[in-house]
Image: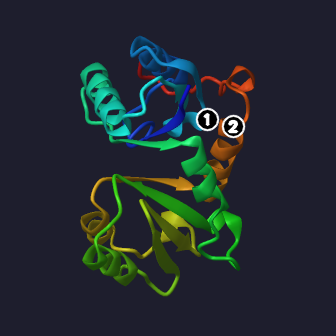
Amino acid sequence: MPRYVALLRGINVGRHLVKMDWLRQQFADLGFRSISTLIASGNVLFESPSSNTAGLERRIEGHLESALGYEVGTFLRTAAEIAAVAGYEAFPSAGETAVYVLFLRGPLAREAQARVIGCGTKHDEFHVKGREVYWLARAGMGRTAVNATALGKATGLATARNVNTVRKLAVLMSAPSARTPRSPRSRGSRR
């Protein structure tokens, strides 16, 4: 059965607090199997007989918006896709903790790619490959001087993960689903 990771945008950010056991139940309510989460930032691993990823994204988004009352952008990747992202070295000499991956709906047009690259600063560099944007944030994402509005306009809807999280997801997705660990419960107060 196909295995996916749903990278959710806006989970446990600001006032949008969601417990991971509640989130796993929402995926179970959609009929998915072998559901687990990794850290409390909206990384849900699951199995579904469907290979229609766009349809799955729409189903998950609709269900979560109904349950939470706000839009939750959903970006699905297969085990092979997340492994390719995890293994890609966009910045070979960079420290691991400074690299982030922005997951997109689809590949960017050349003009949008140029705008993304143009968002770079003295401490920030971008690289575009397929449906992902790799971001070397030398000062850390919390202290970046990147114009978030300009970057958002160039990429459209996206969600970011530290490359270390992406690598952990790739390892979990390559393991047999019966052995995939569940993440500890979130301390979020909502639901």
- The reply to whether the C-beta atoms of the residues labelled 2 and 1 are less than 8 Å apart is yes
Structural crowding at the residue carrying mark 1, measured as other residues with C-alpha within 10 Å and reported as few (<14), some (14–19) or many (≥20): many
The answer to whether 75 is drawn above or below residue 139 in the figure is: above
Residue at point 36% right, 34% down?
52
Q: Nearer the viewer, residue 88 or 190?
A: 88
The answer to whether 60 is drawn above or below residue 112 in the figure is: above
User: Of helix, strand and loop, which one carries label 2?
Assistant: helix
Structural crowding at the residue carrying mark 2, measured as other residues with C-alpha within 10 Å and reported as few (<14), some (14–19) or many (≥20): many
Name the residue beneath numbered marker 1: 38
Q: Amino acid at mark 2?
A: Leu
User: Of helix, strand and loop, which one carries label 1?
Assistant: loop
Q: Earlier in the sequence, mark 2 or mark 1?
A: 1
The answer to whether 5 is drawn above or below residue 97 in the figure is: above
Q: Residue 153's image quarter?
A: bottom left
Q: How is the image coloured?
A: rainbow
Q: Position of residue 100 (x, y in %)?
A: 54, 62
Q: Nearer the viewer, residue 116 or 16?
A: 116
Q: Amino acid at mark 1?
A: Leu
Residue at point 55% right, 34% down?
40
Name the residue beneath numbered marker 2: 172
Q: Position of residue 123 (x, y in %)?
A: 52, 82
Q: Residue 39's image quarter?
A: top right
